[in-house]
């Protein structure tokens, strides 16, 4: 039960939480939050917390929760534990924009599908705040995606009566420039004009479907080889959260085991053996530090400019498009492509890689065949 007390000139709301210690014993942990010099404001917060505790115990809907308090709880209990710092900053910006665009939403229970639809419409019609610059539909979709995730969390934690995530559709067609898959000639150019570690990062994208944020922080321990684990049938890479680096996967289904392409197996194994003697990370810079996502993207932009690739059509992410396209061309199904890419559902794969036809049924391919002479040998 929450209670109010004063310390100095500030009123606090205190409460007790219980957890198990190392011996498995239940212990009490006092918690407190500073509220305001105004005692009435602190009492209102205390009353809401008491009602929320009652709602939690009886699994009823929480009511009259201020929208900002709703966001703060979402951020503290979910976003800060699941998202990267850069993504959290974007979330804060999106939330400030939402409050400016939809000032009539003051309570959590008003955060419904009508509010999200109104936000989409106003962002599309009114443009960027302060400049009236027209926004791309893809930008609006990213903002609404974050708000939909917040609504899903609100439903799960009994702030909202419905899961509005499923009731709000983002724009089915974006006006962003789609990235093209590489041709065999372009792949050969990339391999011939890059060295470790950027070359290996491209190998992980083109032949294994990894995002830049998945490839760059790979640890040597993420590689599982049959030599060390005779019980496994095929070598693979574990794609997991890197909590120690505060780097998290895009979705829960992004966590996956990616089989190592047979064509690159010997090459990647050689790199791995070299790196385990020098660093914990598979991709490192000349100074021995982990390759950063920003550094990889910057290098790729400069490389593609030198090779004559159009910047609006090609980026590091084109490797994933190439991977997905080759699965399709090699006879793989939409479901196989979606799981291999770590998408949360096949709809994302279908919308991004439009060559797929969901009604077609293909056999499973063992690996993607790409015409390239031979793996590079130099480090």
Image: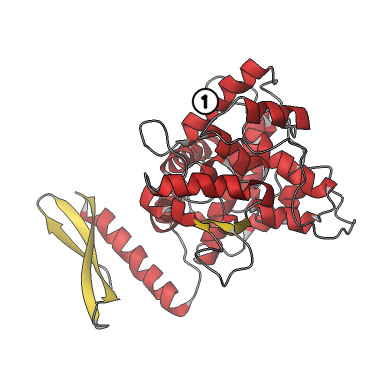
Residue neighbourhood size for the residue with mark 1, other residues' Cα within 10 Å, grouped as few (<14), some (14–19), many (≥20) = few
Q: Is residue 20 left or right of residue 195?
A: left
Residue 342 at x, y = what percent? 63, 54
Q: Which of 242/370 is in front? A: 370
Quadrant of residue 275 within the rendered picture: top left
Residue 49 at x, y = what percent? 34, 65
- Residue 48 is at least partly visible in this image: yes
Quadrant of residue 161 within the rendered picture: bottom right
Q: Residue at x 54, y 33 (%)?
A: 378
Residue 319 at x, y = what percent? 67, 38
Q: Which element is circle 1 on?
A: helix
Q: Which of 282/19 is in front? A: 282
- Residue 120 is at least partly visible in this image: no
Q: Which residue is denoted by mark 1 in the rendering?
A: 298
Q: Which of 90/182 is in front? A: 182
Q: Is residue 132 left or right of residue 85?
A: right
Task: Look at the picture and state if 202 lies above or below 304.
Answer: below
Quadrant occupied by the N terminus: bottom left
């Amino acid at each position: 039960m929450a209670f109010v007390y004063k310390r100095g000139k500030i009123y606090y709301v205190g409460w007790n939480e219980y957890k198990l210690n190392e011996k498995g014993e239940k212990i009490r942990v006092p918690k407190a939050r500073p509220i305001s010099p105004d005692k009435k404001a602190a009492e209102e917060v205390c009353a809401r917390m008491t009602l929320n505790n009652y709602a939690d115990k009886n699994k009823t809907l929480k009511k009259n929760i201020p929208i900002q308090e709703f966001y703060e709880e979402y951020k503290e209990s979910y976003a800060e534990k699941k998202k990267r710092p850069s993504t959290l900053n974007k979330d804060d910006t999106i939330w400030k924009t939402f409050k400016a665009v939809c000032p009539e939403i003051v309570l959590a229970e008003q955060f419904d599908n009508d509010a999200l639809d109104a936000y989409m419409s106003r962002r599309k019609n009114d443009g960027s705040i302060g400049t009236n610059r027209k926004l791309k539909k893809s930008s609006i979709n990213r903002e609404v995606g974050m708000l939909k995730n917040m609504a899903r969390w609100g439903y799960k934690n009994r702030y909202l009566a419905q899961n509005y995530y499923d009731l709000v559709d983002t724009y089915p067609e974006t006006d962003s420039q789609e990235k093209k898959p590489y041709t065999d000639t372009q792949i050969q150019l990339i391999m011939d004009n890059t060295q470790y570690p950027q070359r290996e990062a491209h190998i992980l994208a083109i032949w294994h479907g990894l995002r830049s944020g998945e490839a760059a922080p790979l640890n040597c321990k993420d590689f599982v080889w049959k030599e060390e684990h005779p019980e496994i049938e095929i070598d693979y890479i574990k794609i997991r959260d890197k909590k120690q680096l505060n780097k998290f996967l895009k979705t829960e289904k992004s966590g996956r085991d990616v089989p190592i392409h047979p064509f690159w197996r010997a090459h990647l194994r050689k790199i791995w053996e070299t790196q385990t003697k020098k660093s914990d990370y598979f991709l490192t810079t000349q100074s021995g530090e982990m390759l950063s996502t920003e550094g990889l993207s910057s290098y790729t932009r400069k490389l593609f400019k030198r090779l004559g690739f159009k910047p609006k059509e090609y980026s590091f992410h084109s490797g994933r498009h190439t991977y997905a396209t080759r699965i399709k061309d090699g006879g793989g199904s939409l479901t196989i492509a979606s799981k291999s890419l770590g998408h949360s559902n096949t709809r994302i794969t279908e919308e991004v890689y439009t060559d797929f036809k969901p009604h077609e049924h293909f056999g499973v391919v063992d690996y993607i065949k790409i015409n390239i002479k031979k793996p590079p040998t130099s480090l």
